[in-house]
Amino acid sequence: MNFELSYIPDRPSKPRTTGLTMVMDKGLSVNEAHQFVESSGEFTDFIKLGFGTSMITNKLDQKLDIYKKSGLRPYFGGTLFEAFAIRNQIDSFRKFIDKYKVDLVEISDGSMSMPHEKKLEYIRHFSKQVTVISEVGSKQKGVYIPADQWVKMMKNELEAGSMKVIAEARESGTIGIYNSDGTANENLINAISSQINSSDVLWEAPNGKQQVWFIKIFGANVNLGNIAPNLVIPLECLRLGLRGDTFFDFLPDELKKQQQKESH
Amino acid sequence: MNFELSYIPDRPSKPRTTGLTMVMDKGLSVNEAHQFVESSGEFTDFIKLGFGTSMITNKLDQKLDIYKKSGLRPYFGGTLFEAFAIRNQIDSFRKFIDKYKVDLVEISDGSMSMPHEKKLEYIRHFSKQVTVISEVGSKQKGVYIPADQWVKMMKNELEAGSMKVIAEARESGTIGIYNSDGTANENLINAISSQINSSDVLWEAPNGKQQVWFIKIFGANVNLGNIAPNLVIPLECLRLGLRGDTFFDFLPDELKKQQQKESH
Amino acid sequence: MNFELSYIPDRPSKPRTTGLTMVMDKGLSVNEAHQFVESSGEFTDFIKLGFGTSMITNKLDQKLDIYKKSGLRPYFGGTLFEAFAIRNQIDSFRKFIDKYKVDLVEISDGSMSMPHEKKLEYIRHFSKQVTVISEVGSKQKGVYIPADQWVKMMKNELEAGSMKVIAEARESGTIGIYNSDGTANENLINAISSQINSSDVLWEAPNGKQQVWFIKIFGANVNLGNIAPNLVIPLECLRLGLRGDTFFDFLPDELKKQQQKESH
């Protein structure tokens, strides 16, 4: 885009390694995928076919093709990996991703319990053939993981071969890195960001307020995930300071001062 | 679908009499209806053109055709029936459904008061020509119907000719069979399910948490309604145990035990 | 529409000056715009490309054409005007609207502070060439504007050339004319409606409950804005009394009495 507006933050062009937007597709049709890519493909890096939706997606191969041809990287939600894992059917999972030529895999343990060493083995194993992203945090209410353990798990998983670690929030944004009212769990997020390179973390942030919070703390190019398809453009506007909530965040002090002076 | 995954609950194929999903269409365009049917038609049994939307739907006949040709049964929301009823214009209503060749009719009294005998007459009358489903429960806050009256009305309506009775929740899911915070009114639901055959009831369950609750209590093939079009695939995943909330519900004990053993 | 139903309120046909519906487009694709216009164009007067979305809209000219050809008036969200204003780039803003042949402009000061006299100058200036609508109210929490100042600003802005004044609510509907829980700020709304001609005000009312509230107070043809594209048809049903919430609002007393008599 060739902005006529000054003071718009720089956004890296694709393929990006930072400033990533990960979208959650919960069952778009082929045509909807087309439309999404046309309007929002430029601003989307990863697209997750949420939980087990890919098992019941009509024309799955066509949809995946649309995403791939437009420079989006599709992958299957971690819950699907876990559904195969708990059934001792990881070979079938590998066949499934091979069949659909998906080169990005999420390894997670949000729905089931898994010894961490076993998760790390999966990461080491899959990262030999495909790009792995791994998710830390439980989907279950009441499962409490101390901050230092989050950090340790994330470090180990990056070391084992994960390209990015995902900080769990669910689609609802009320668990993991968020309190049950959806506000940020600042202690946990501070612990993570002080010890893990921020560009290595992809924060799930389904709600607008959560997106605003992360952009204000970590800047325009924070990695954000679990974005609904119709919120990608609004999120991009937040990143660019083109919305009320981040209107002042990327302006130089002189413009802010001039406004204050004029209006008082 | 040919699932590679074991322990996926059986779902009856269409036309189904149990495990029904009823969707609420609040104004999809013809193209959107096409897309919906392509992605979600297999998982949808009834599609309700919500409240009076059908009176202002552009290309209504085309939209109805799309649904019918794909094996979905479209019908007009009960509020439309009531809008004709309160105006003493039931003949016009009959002409309206004849004109559009709709063979499924909802008889309800959620917006207006109607002597129950009169409602039963409507059910008897319409069920001679078309399939009737009838709805019990008020849309109005503060209108309290005791549980034994719910049960009695449902029994009478089934006897009068209703194929299914619908338990009211509104689109918001905060009334009827739900408390005002959206949680299930368990006393009422227990009273109904202990006296009415579960397959004869279609529970309105617009919110994900409500859907999870019903699937956990009544199983994968509970009849659920007022599902938004973009939530049909997520709901089907819940029914199949392919989402976090119902991840363990259909697994055999041996797999659950194995997981617990490994992770402790 | 040729309604078979009696007692449906009259709605003016387009181009309307009252009973307006203003829609917020947060990033529809070209095809989605097509679909929207097909199903809901008849019920939509203004369509706002929300905040700065138009700066990153792919095929913006095509989308605008679709709206214009169908008799909708598209315009750019007030935040975009403000983004140019705070950067002292109003000339670029004018070029932008000229380039896209947009003849409706929103002048607002919801994200930034602006001396009111300066805002009035903008209104006077732009209203010489295009239609101006201006917005009163801050997007920021904690910025409190007394009711008499709202009224004064609205009067001045109408006098300066605004065709309509918009009462701010944000997309969330929790600020400006609403309390933080989304209920109507009745004192403020009363103050406005007692001193400003109701047809000159366009009330932002993103939530269904807010729409119901305004229709019950001001009638079927109240001007409402910030309507999501998929809520235009449900809103039109509310205006026409074809939904539970406004089911009785346009019925004559005789029909209401008849119903009460029958059911008791």
Image (spheres, coloured by chain):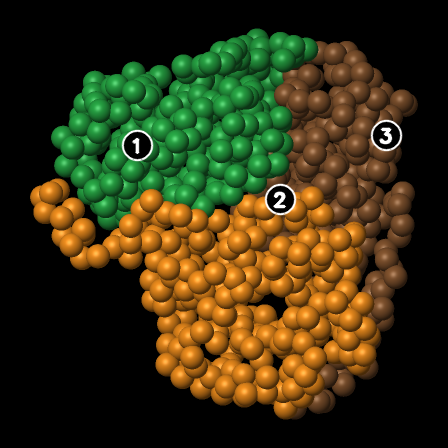
Chain colours: A brown, B green, C orange
Q: Secondary structure at mark 2?
A: helix
Looking at the rendered structure, the kind of residue marked 3 is Thr
**In this rendering, position of residue A41 left or right of residue B95:** right
Q: Which residue is mark 1?
A: B94
Q: Which residue is mark 3?
A: A131
Q: Residues within 10 Å of mark 1 (few under 14, many from 20)?
A: some
Q: Residues within 10 Å of mark 2 (few under 14, many from 20)?
A: some
Residue C147 percent across, percent down from the top left? 44, 82
The image shows residue B161, relative to residue A165, as above or below, that is above
**Residue at screen point 45% across, 14% down:** B16
Q: Secondary structure at mark 3?
A: strand
Residue B77 percent across, percent down from the top left? 37, 36
Q: Secondary structure at mark 1?
A: helix
Q: Are marks 3 and 1 in contact (CB under 8 Å)?
A: no
**Residue at screen point 53% across, 72% down:** C166
Q: Which residue is mark 2?
A: C35
**Residue at screen point 66% across, 33% down:** A28
Q: State whether residue A246 appears in this view.
A: no
Which of label 3 and label 1 is nearer to you? 1
What's the distance in space between the residues labelled 3 and 2, CA to CA?
38 Å
**In this rendering, position of residue B135 left or right of residue B23:** left
